[in-house]
Image: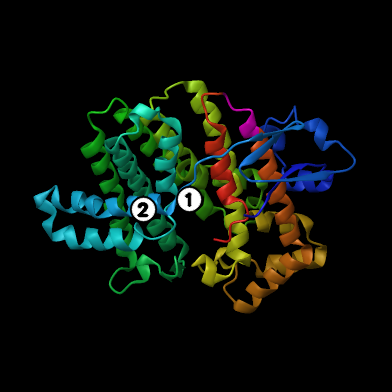
Amino acid sequence: MPFAKLCVQKLSNPLMKLCYPNLNGRLSLSKFSNSLDNSTFKFLSCNPHTICREHNTVAIRPQTITKDDKRDFMAVFPDIVRDLTQQDPGISDLSTLISKLMQYNVSGGKKVRGLTVVYSYRMLAPDHDLTPENIRLAQILGWCVEMLQGFFVVIDDLTDQSVTRRGRPCWYRLPGIGLRASSDALLIQAGTFQLLQQHCKDKEFYVDLVELFLDATRRTTYGQTLDLVSSFPNITHLTMDRYNFITKYKTSYYTFHLPVAIAMYMAGIYNTELHRQAKSVLLEMGHYFQVQDDYLDVFSDEEVSGKKGTDIQEGKCTWLAIIAFQRASPSQREILESCYGSKDPEKIQKVKDIFIEIGLPAVFHAYEEETYNLITRQIQQLSEGLPHELFLTLLHKMYGRKQ
C-alpha cells in the first residue's frame, strides 16, 4: 500500500500566499504556525492508517469501504427504482422513463457520496443500533444522495454543454432528449423527496433530513449559477474569493457535508458544536476535492477519468485559471486572454501549453501535499464525539486520485 506523507514543513511564503490566499479565514492553524516557520522541512512517511501527533505516532486502523459494501449498496438499487415507479399508479406512463433515467444517471459512477452515508453511519452509531434494518435505511439514504448528484449532473452537463460523463454521452445528448433533460432532472429530484418521505417520515430525524437536502440543493444551485455567470472573458470574475464561494456551494455541501450530516442525525448526534466542527472539516475537504477536479479536467487521461474536460473552452473560473493569470508573464497573459474560453482546439492547446510553462502541475502537487497535511491537522483537533478515523479515511481516499 502506498505511503501517505504527513508534512511538518515550511512552504515558501509566495507559494503559500498563492495557494492559500484566505488561509487564516479557512483554517485555524495557530498551533501549526510554528512548524511552518522552520527554515527546513521534513517529510514523515507513515502508513495511511497511522497519524503522527507532535512527536508520537498513534496507530489507527479505520474501517474502509469494501467490495461487499459496494455490492450490498448496489443490491438495494432495484428496490429504489421499484419504489419510484410503483408507489403511484398515476405515473405508470412515466415508469419506463424514470427507470431509464435512474439507470443512466444514478446507478453509474463511483457512488462515493452514497457509500459515505453507510460508512459514516457505521462509524458513528453505537453497536446496538447497527441492525440490518438501520443499515438498509442508511443505504436508501445513500441512494437519495446519489439521486441528488444525478439531478445536478444532468443539469450541469446540459448548461455546460459537456460531451461525456462517466465514459459515455451525457444524458441530454441522447436521441430525443436535448433540452428535455432539464425536466428529466426534476423527476430525479422529486424522487429523492419521495423516498425520504416513504422511508423516514416516522423517524425523529425526518425534518432534519428534509432540511439538509433542501439546504444542500439550495446551496449547490447557488454555486452552479455563480459558476455559470463567472466565466471568462470577464477577467474580474477570475478571483480566488469568487472561486472559494463557488467551490463551497457547488461542491462541498452536497458532496461532503450532506452524507456525513445524514449519518450523524441517524446516529442520534444532534449536538450543534459537533455538527459545526464536522462541517468545518468537510467543507475543507470539498475545496480540496474541487481543486483536484479542476486539475483533472485539464491534465487527466480521459480514458481513466471517463470525462472529457471542458473548463478551458468554457472559460470557467477554476483554480488553474486563477493561478495561471496570477503567475503569467505579460506575453503569456496576452495569450491566455486571447485563447482562454475559446472552443478552437489550437487555442485550447495553447492554454494548456501556458499552464505547463508556468509550472501549474508542480504548483498543484505542492498544494495537494500541503492541503492533505493541513486537513489532517484539523481532523486531529476534532472533539472526541467525532471519530478521527472517519474523517481521515475520507481524506485519504481523495489523496492522489486520478478520477
- The image's colour scheme reads rainbow
The quarter of the picture where the C terminus appears is bottom right
Q: Is residue 21 left or right of residue 194?
A: right
* 229 in the magenta segment: no
Label 1 SS? helix
Which residue occupies 33% across, 54% down? 74
Image coordinates of residue 140 in percent, x first then y, are: 30, 44
Image coordinates of residue 181 in percent, x first then y, are: 32, 62
Which kind of residue does numbered mark 1 sit on? Gln
Return the residue nearer the eye: 71 or 20: 71
The label shown at residue 255 is none
Which residue occupies 22% across, 28% down? 202
Residue behind mark 1? 224
Image depth: mark 1 or mark 2 in front: 2
Residue 245 shows in the view: no
The quarter of the picture where the N terminus appears is bottom right
Say few, some or many: other residues with alpha carbon within 10 Å of mark 2 (under 14 / 14 to 19 / 20 or more). many
Residue behind mark 2? 151
Label 2 SS? helix
